[in-house]
Image (cartoon, rainbow, N blue to C red):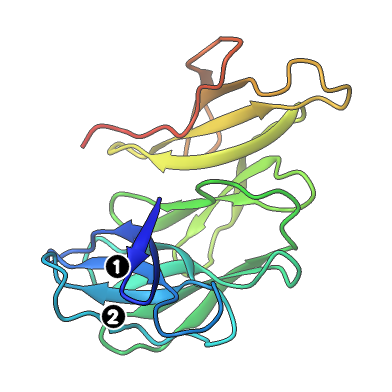
Amino acid sequence: KSHKGPGGDDTFRRWPAGGRIVFGSNREFADPTARLYIMDADGRNGQRIPTRDDEAARFPTPTPDGRDVFYRGGSAYAGSPYRVVGLESGAPRDVFHTGPIGREVHRPFALSRDGGDIAFVQEGNEPREIVVMGRHGENRRTVATYALGFLDAPAWSGDGRIAYTAVYRPANGAGRGRADIHVVDADGGNEVVLTHTRSYDGMPAWSP
């Protein structure tokens, strides 16, 4: 979701610890690319979080302690570096990288509730894998695959399971637009399909 901010569009809003809001905006730039900003909950004291001027900073996701923000940089043509930036230090660094984006996904990655792990959609021509690794890039492993379409929107539960959307999109186009919600353990075990419909069931979110 987005809305018109002062001089630009504000989008991808998230709440870090401390009650401030992290969001993307192009308010200081002539192009539509969103960069990272932070402001108080009442809209005051807005300031830019330094990232690269020449690339997007999409899907900002604060760590639970509110010290850092993960985001996706890059473009559909240059690939997708995933970076983390300190809210105080303003020093971004790469965490991991995926290939060029073949199909846009709505929510490509999620931090675990304790901030120790990342679940993300492995991108490419058809993003068919959910991958989990430590927040610094260690212990990377595939926990879910889907051969009949693509995956989207990983979301962590409080006890460390991952819900995600499996979008049914076979090569012949039959049943296009269907999707179901799956849940899997962080080690790839105990996968369960929660919905079985002919409609689009997606974008899962867990209760607090």
Residue located 50% across and 48% down the image: 107
Residue type at mark 1 is: Val
Is 118 displayed left or right of 15 in the figure? right
Residue type at mark 2 is: Leu
Question: Can you give x and y, in whole percent of width and height, for residue 132 in the image?
Answer: 53, 50
Q: Residues within 10 Å of mark 2 (few under 14, many from 20)?
A: many
Label 1 vs 2, first from the N-terminus: 1
Residue located 73% across and 31% down the image: 149
Q: Of residues 41 and 165, which is closer to you in this image?
A: 41
Rounded to the nearest angstrom, the CA distance separating label 1 from label 2 is: 10 Å
Is 154 displayed left or right of 86 in the figure? right
Q: Of residues 54 and 152, which is closer to you in this image?
A: 54
Query: Could you tell me if residue 190 is visible in this image?
Result: no
Q: Of residues 111 and 100, which is closer to you in this image?
A: 100
Quarter holding residue 59? bottom left
From the viewer's perspective, is the residue at label 1 or at label 2 nearer? Answer: 1
Q: Is residue 129 above or below residue 23?
A: above
Q: Is residue 156 above or below residue 10?
A: above
The tag on residue 87 is: 2
The single residue placed furthest to the top in the displayed view is: 197
Q: Residues within 10 Å of mark 1 (few under 14, many from 20)?
A: many
Label 1, on which residue?
A: 22
Q: Is residue 155 above or below residue 24?
A: above
The single residue placed furthest to the right in the displayed view is: 172
Are dots 1 and 2 in contact, CB under 8 Å?
Answer: yes
Is 175 displayed left or right of 185 in the figure? right
Question: Can you give x and y, in whole percent of width and height, for residue 41 in the image?
Answer: 13, 64
Residue located 71% across and 64% down the image: 76
Secondary element at image label 2: loop
Secondary element at image label 1: strand
